[in-house]
Image (cartoon, rainbow, N blue to C red):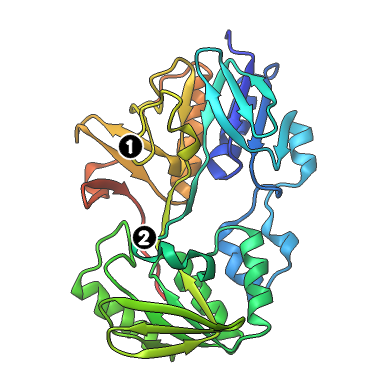
């Protein structure tokens, strides 16, 4: 195999499993992972348990530093890749360092999605994607007794459970964007709100939010088209979008994510994308689909690594498992029982 210097951008499940698969395929190659975050790989689904005080922060992390040493994988945390020069086969970091590669896997995952309607209030809306976000929630919840959740994704439901364990009063708004990228129809709306109300959560039935005002440091006023609400904190949960903005001018084909074929290969030689940041071509559908979810990310990460190492594995997804939402095709598991 000619490839000797592998670079992986990302540190989530797709990136880590890609790195481990590469090491299994090639014991001599140099493998370097770059992560913009200052912390090692963590279990995102456990963040609500950390907020609720059910686990310690160290329990979030699923790979000790020693693991990377044992696998001979260089993990560079807090190192943001800001550009990729595919003609020169280099990644460029924010501190101007240039790192050459022979093979590249882009596995940057997703970042919290804030619909355009709410972006004006982004600085006072709290999200939950990283351990840093969780620490902010813990700090905020030490001062407030009530929380308004706008959303409906898996993270928002898990966080709501944590808030109830902490004895907080929770109000919940679901709107047309709440379950993005899965469409929210009347049947699903009734089912979700019913389960929330059974837990003692107040549902705010409204069509739109007119205004959000910060009255005090720990007091917000939210005006909807149906009522006026005062709460201590506001959480925004509208799913994730691929974190690929830094690649927009690199020559990669990008739509909602990085466009790859059914083998996860981009238009550039020995460059692959995997996980939430990739849009994967489906030969049967003759269209691209987006992968969402932990298990999907693991599978795609390993396939990308195997193919970079010389295999020819095709991503296998049944067409009936792919939903179309607003012109975007998505492979995702539905929300779990609340």
Number of other residues with Cα within 10 Å of mark 1, as a class: few under 14, some 14 to 19, many 20 or more: few
The image quarter containing residue 237 is bottom left
Whether residue 83 sits left or right of residue 248 in the image: it is right
User: Where's residue 152, x and y in %?
Assistant: 38, 70
Residue that label 1 marks? 255
Whether residue 315 sits left or right of residue 46 in the image: it is left
Disc on the earlier residue, 1 or 2: 2
Whether residue 87 sits left or right of residue 49 in the image: it is left
Judged from the image, the secondary structure of the residue bearing numbered disc 1 is loop
The CA distance from mark 1 to mark 2 is 17 Å
Residue that label 2 marks? 115
State which quarter of the image contains the N terminus.
top right
User: Where's residue 253, x and y in %?
Assistant: 36, 28
The image quarter containing residue 77 is top right
Considering only vertical position in the picture, is 104 above or below 211? above
Residue drawn at point x = 44 percent, y = 51 percent: 293
User: Where's residue 158, x and y in %?
Assistant: 50, 71
């Amino acid at each position: 195999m000619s490839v000797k210097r592998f670079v992986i951008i990302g540190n989530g499940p797709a990136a880590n499993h890609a790195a481990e698969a590469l090491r299994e395929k090639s014991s001599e190659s140099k493998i370097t992972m770059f992560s913009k975050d200052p912390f090692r790989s963590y279990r995102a689904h456990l963040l609500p348990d950390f907020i609720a005080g059910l686990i310690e922060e160290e329990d979030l992390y699923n790979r000790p530093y020693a693991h990377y040493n044992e696998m001979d994988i260089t993990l560079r945390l807090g190192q943001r890749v800001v550009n990729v020069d595919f003609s020169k086969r280099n990644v460029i970091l924010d501190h101007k360092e240039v790192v050459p590669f022979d093979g590249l896997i882009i596995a940057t995952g997703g970042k919290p999605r804030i619909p355009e309607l709410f972006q004006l209030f982004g600085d006072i809306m709290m999200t939950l994607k990283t351990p840093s976000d969780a620490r902010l929630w813990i700090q905020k919840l030490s001062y407030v007794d009530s929380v308004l959740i706008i959303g409906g994704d898996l993270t928002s439901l898990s966080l709501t459970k944590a808030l109830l364990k902490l004895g907080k009063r929770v109000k919940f708004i679901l709107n047309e964007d709440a379950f993005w990228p899965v469409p929210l129809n009347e049947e699903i709306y009734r089912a979700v709100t019913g389960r929330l109300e059974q837990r003692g959560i107040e549902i705010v039935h409204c069509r739109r939010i007119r205004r959000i005002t910060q009255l005090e440091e720990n007091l917000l006023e939210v005006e909807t088209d149906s009522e006026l609400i005062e709460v201590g904190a506001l959480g925004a949960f509208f799913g994730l979008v691929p974190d690929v903005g830094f690649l927009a001018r690199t020559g990669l084909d990008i739509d909602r994510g990085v466009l790859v074929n059914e083998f996860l290969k981009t238009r550039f030689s020995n460059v692959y994308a995997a996980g939430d940041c990739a849009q994967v071509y489906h030969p049967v559908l003759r269209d691209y689909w987006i992968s969402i979810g932990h298990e999907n990310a693991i599978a795609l990460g390993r396939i990308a690594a195997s193919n970079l190492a010389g295999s020819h594995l095709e991503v296998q997804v049944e067409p009936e498992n792919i939903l179309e939402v607003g012109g975007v095709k998505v492979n995702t598991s539905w929300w779990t029982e609340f």
